[in-house]
Amino acid sequence: MGNSTSSQSVTPALREWVVAQATAGMGVQKILQAMLEAGWQQAVAVQAIEDTLRVHLSQQAIEARLPPAVPVPRVPLDGSPLYLDLGDRRVHIISHMQKPPIVVIGGFLSDEECALMVEAARPKMARSRTVDTQTGGEELNDARTSSGMFFSRGQNEIVQRIEARIARLLSWPVENGEGIQVLHYHPGAEYRPHYDYFNPAEPGTPSILKRGGQRVGTFLMYLNEPDKGGGTTFPDVRLEVAPKRGNAVFFSYDRPDPSTQSLHGGAPVIAGEKWIATKWLREREFT
């Protein structure tokens, strides 16, 4: 596998070696380190690993007969912008990940907007339910110990303002989204790791998909700040997003399968309380 820095061609043999190491359980950082120690330039090594594993994973998806990938909403990150102008508000990019596609957005909501959302939702809160994919209805779930409510799409001025801002950021039509859900977590409350897409193997999924197709993205906004705990976790990539008031985290999933690494959860609130608002994006118009 050794190579001099004067000749940096990526050969089929090298690609086979990268796939073999990854299949054997070697992490990307260790593969990269091995290539650097063998004399590869870092930029060439990184590109070779990324390209090889991307092709390998795509082939695995085909071989495993996974659902086909579909277009998903995206934050415009070409040119690595620090700020994005959304017309009525300027937001900043705190961090982003390519695989899975996760973007943390600073200042998406003002403190006033956060307070308005909480006060509008507070009188209507009830024990949170999840979608029952056996029947297509709703059910109480021990994995979700928050209380919550849904605004209908465009229900009031503050909801309309936020929905329009999300649509501008993601270039995804307002109508291709469910109503915003507001959740309230007391100390000890959590939402254990789960996927937001609807499992194609469940009997109730076909009836759910009639209302707008699959979920393809999740836009989560933090409306307050717990004293401790309450972060949004992504176990597959060992990431936790802190629940900072006014910030948001967006992630997408182009097929209803764990290969999207979109597993996520709401960590238990340790002290204080947590309020969040979530907007799920669908493939088509949600009715």
Image (cartoon, grey):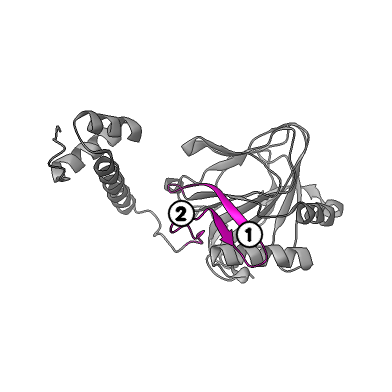
Q: Does residue 111 lie above or below 271 as drawn?
A: below
Residue nearest the observer in this picture, 270 or 39: 39
Asked whether residue 81 is drawn in magenta, I would say yes
Task: Please name whichever residue, 111 or 255, is drawn nearer the observer in this view of the structure.
Answer: 111
- Residue tagged by mark 2? 80
Label 2 neighbour load within 10 Å: few <14, some 14-19, many 20+: few
Q: Quadrant of the N terminus?
A: top left
Which numbered disc flags the more N-terminal residue, 1 or 2?
2
Residue 117 visible in rendering:
yes
Residue that appears at 28% across and 33% down: 31
Q: Amino acid at mark 1?
A: Arg
Q: Which residue is mark 1?
A: 90
Per the rendered image, the range of residues in magenta is 72-100
How far across and down, in percent of the image, does residue 248 sit? 63, 50
Residue 223 x/y as whole percent: 73, 48
Q: Is residue 210 magenta?
A: no
